[in-house]
Amino acid sequence: MKLLISNDDGISALGIRTLANCLAEAGHDVTVVCPDRERSATGHGLTLHQPIRAEIVESIFHPSIKAWACDGTPSDCVKLALWALLDSPPDLVLSGINQGANLGTEILYSGTVSAAMEGMIEGIPSIAMSLTSHTYKNFQPAAHFAKILVEQLSIKPIPDLMLLNVNVPPVNWEEIAGVQFTRQGVRRYVDVFDKRTDPRGKTYYWLTGEVLEDVEPPAGLNLPQNVPIDVHVIRDNYISITPLQYNLTYANGLDKLSQWEFKFS
């Protein structure tokens, strides 16, 4: 398959190198276009008020891989690749492997998910891959599963235009319990801002915070209750796959709002 790979951890990240090299060694046609530095938690931001530059990168990846480092956001990288750098569209867009989870409401801020979402917006099936630890450095199990998943999609394509948000537990391959299809959970945080004082006595704030709890999403979303939540299955060492879409329309909300009446005089 012809694959486009990006990320938000930057061109030097071990995760993207492991993923791209694994898929290239499996015989796929791999192109990498990703940020030239760390761009985590940038969401779906695009660069509009300054030029975007991309430079060819050599000697980092497998010899068959064509790679560019871009000074824009993860979404910039995928958009630039699809419209300017590639000679034809890829069969699949992959983003990752991210260092850290993208579970629950975290996906709203994730540059990893947004890069994959950009591929889906352009009509290309996409996958976001994350390793659910900020310290565990063995990306091989996640890359191995990515290879299995891509092989599966080459035989049986995704039945509809969607993004597969894949989270892999930080354990060895032999310890992975299996794969579960999941729905998106909700993560709540505590101590989100750390208030500090600089050497000149001025106050500043550092965005931090830890997960306080993982909670059930609201029942009104019409999601099947018998499908497990992404944040739960990871605890039991299952790989979580959550299908996502870019249309955020709230169907129940439309039903409720349809009862409103506006009077114009």
Image (cartoon, rainbow, N blue to C red):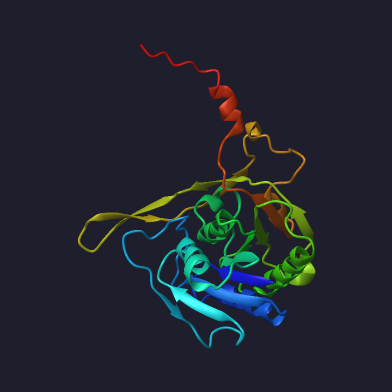
Where is 59 relative to 240, above or below? below
Q: Nearer the viewer, residue 75 or 234?
A: 75
Left/right of residue 90 with respect to residue 197 in the rendered view: right
Q: Residue 250 appears in which quarter of the rendering?
A: top right
Residue 131 visible in the current orientation:
no
Residue sitting at the far front: 87
Point out residue 232 in the picture as x, y percentages from the top left corner: 69, 50
Point out residue 33 in the picture as x, y percentages from the top left corner: 51, 72
Q: Nearer the viewer, residue 67 or 105?
A: 67
Where is 46 relative to 224, above or below? below
Determine the residue positioned at 61% across, 53% down. 103
Left/right of residue 128 with respect to residue 264 in the rendered view: right
Point out residue 214 in the picture as x, y percentages from the top left corner: 61, 46
Residue sitting at the far left: 200
Quadrant in which the N terminus appears: bottom right
Determine the residue positioned at 74% across, 38% down. 225
Residue 127 visible in the current orientation:
yes
Point out residue 187 in the picture as x, y percentages from the top left corner: 57, 47
Quadrant in which the C terminus appears: top left
Q: How many marks?
A: 0
Determine the residue positioned at 51% across, 18% down. 260
Q: Residue 139 appears in which quarter of the rendering?
A: bottom right
